[in-house]
Amino acid sequence: MPHSSAVLVRLKGATYTDSYFAALSAVLREYAMEVKGYVVYLSVTNPAALLIDILGSVDIPTKNVSFIDVTSYMMVDKAQRAPNTTYVESPTMLETIMLRVEYLLRRSTSERKIVVLDSISSLAIHNNVPILQEFLHILVNKLKSIGATTILFTVIEETAPELSNVLSLISDANVTLEGGGQP
């Protein structure tokens, strides 16, 4: 994946879990470990603590990954907070999410920066489509302008056509994964 690009990964609902973890594993292994990149992972679908546990179970270290968890704020006690994780109160707080992403990227000294958005479909549950379209357009173009690579996950069957059109416009590459992470 070239710097300053956005990749849209479209997943089929029936094979979402297998495809998602295969793609995520490949991204984190290659970029967070081998290239010594820095990853900001926006966790909308699953709590960051769960992702950290799952990634640890398949030997993917998360020391070069910062999580922004927008699902767990109300449920997680401060003593139970996951490492390398910041919490946003709600997935509807798009401006706060954008500011957290920018802040974490500025803090990093890594030359290779990757932002993973999991998932557009989950954000669409909590936000109306026009506002989400605007947020994604601004965020992805901002990330491109600072040289970051963006990976956007979405579930095909759960993505509104008008949102799908915007995702195609802002993405430099579109990949549809069948079962098991295979294009």
Image (cartoon, rainbow, N blue to C red):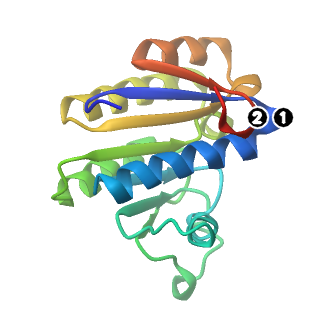
Question: In this rendering, would 67 be left or right of 126?
Answer: left
Residues at marks 1 and 2 touching, judged by CB atoms closer than 8 Å: yes
Decide which of tag 1 and tag 2 comes sooner along the chain: 1
> Which quarter of the rendering shows the C terminus?
top right
Residue to which mark 2 is pinned: 179
Residue flagged by tag 2: what amino acid is it? Gly
> Which quarter of the rendering shows the N terminus?
top left
Residue to which mark 1 is pinned: 14
Instruction: Measuring from the top left, give residue 119's x and y in whole percent.
Output: 59, 40
Secondary structure category for the residue under label 2 = helix
- Foreground of the two, 13 or 104: 13
Instruction: Measuring from the top left, give residue 89's x and y in whole percent.
Output: 52, 60
Q: Residue at x 65, y 43 (%)?
A: 20
Res 91 seen here: no
Secondary structure category for the residue under label 1 = helix
Q: Residue at x 26, y 30 (%)?
A: 4
Residue flagged by tag 1: what amino acid is it? Ala
Q: Is residue 108 above or below residue 62?
A: above
Q: Residue at x 20, y 29 (%)?
A: 145
Mark 1 crowdedness (10 Å alpha carbons): few <14, some 14-19, many ≥20: few
